[in-house]
Amino acid sequence: MIKVYYGDDRVRAKKDIETFLGDEYEIVEGAELAVEDLPSLFWGGSLFSEKRSILIRDLFENKSVYDELPEYVNTVHDIIIFEQKIDKRSSTYKTLKDKIEWKEYKIPVNPNLKRVFDVYAIAKKDGARAVAMLDEIKSEEDPIMFCGLMISQALKDYKAHPGAKEKRALKELSRLDLSLKSTSVQPWLLVQAFLLRLALL
């Protein structure tokens, strides 16, 4: 049986991969496969068992091999192909879409995403107001993820205007990120302290 899992939520995908394949499975890099490898991969047994559990990563990037996949849909092995993304316009996908299982793993969109960016933008001018805005959403957020989103916004600012202040903000954010991962201090206090300092950098 072949299944295709795809998307950017690797944590959820890994759990489902282990549920289906078990704890011990072979890992094959799809980019390194040649067409002549496919019969032994999909039809061949192993020394210990006739039925194998196999995870193939990034097979679809290897077009010549991917195009041969319809020939192997009746494999007796348990096989998951894991991809970052898939092209639903390809003829191979259209051939396979009803013959094997496809499952997407998408990281849920943070409903507070715009508000997180607003907190950072306000903090550049008014730290106290930014802290008040943070208080409204922090119960729904993770401080490390929140810091990561601020870093992405700071990087955008730096690309748009690579000034000294933008560089200092990035340095402070990298320190904040390190502190959040290595200290026992209440994480939101560290974030609030950063927001209060940002306008003064």
Image: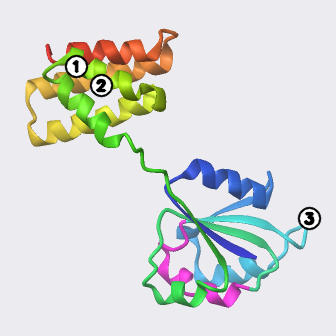
- Residue 48 position in % (x across, y down): 91, 64
Q: Nearer the viewer, mark 2 or mark 3?
A: 2
Q: Secondary structure at mark 1?
A: helix
Name the residue rendered at 51%, 74% in the picture: 60
Q: Are marks 1 and 2 in contact (CB under 8 Å)?
A: yes
- Residue 111 position in % (x across, y down): 40, 44
Q: Is residue 191 above or below residue 163?
A: above
Q: Mark 2 = which residue?
A: 133
Name the residue rendered at 48%, 9% in the picture: 185
Q: Mark 1 = which residue?
A: 129
Point out the stretch of residues depicted in magenta: 58-73
Q: Nearer the viewer, residue 143 or 155?
A: 143
Image quadrant occupied by the C terminus? top left
Residue 127 position by quadrant: top left
- Residue 134 position in % (x across, y down): 34, 24
Dot 2: few (<14), some (14–19), or many (≥20) neighbours within 10 Å?
some
Q: Are marks 2 and 3 in contact (CB under 8 Å)?
A: no
Q: Residue furthest front?
A: 136
Q: Amino acid at mark 3?
A: Phe
Residue 114 position by quadrant: top left
- How far apart are labels 1 and 2 at the CA level? 6 Å
- How far apart are labels 3 and 1 at the CA level? 65 Å
Name the residue rendered at 19%, 31% in the picture: 121
- Residue 17 position in % (x across, y down): 70, 58
- How far apart are labels 2 and 3 at the CA level? 60 Å
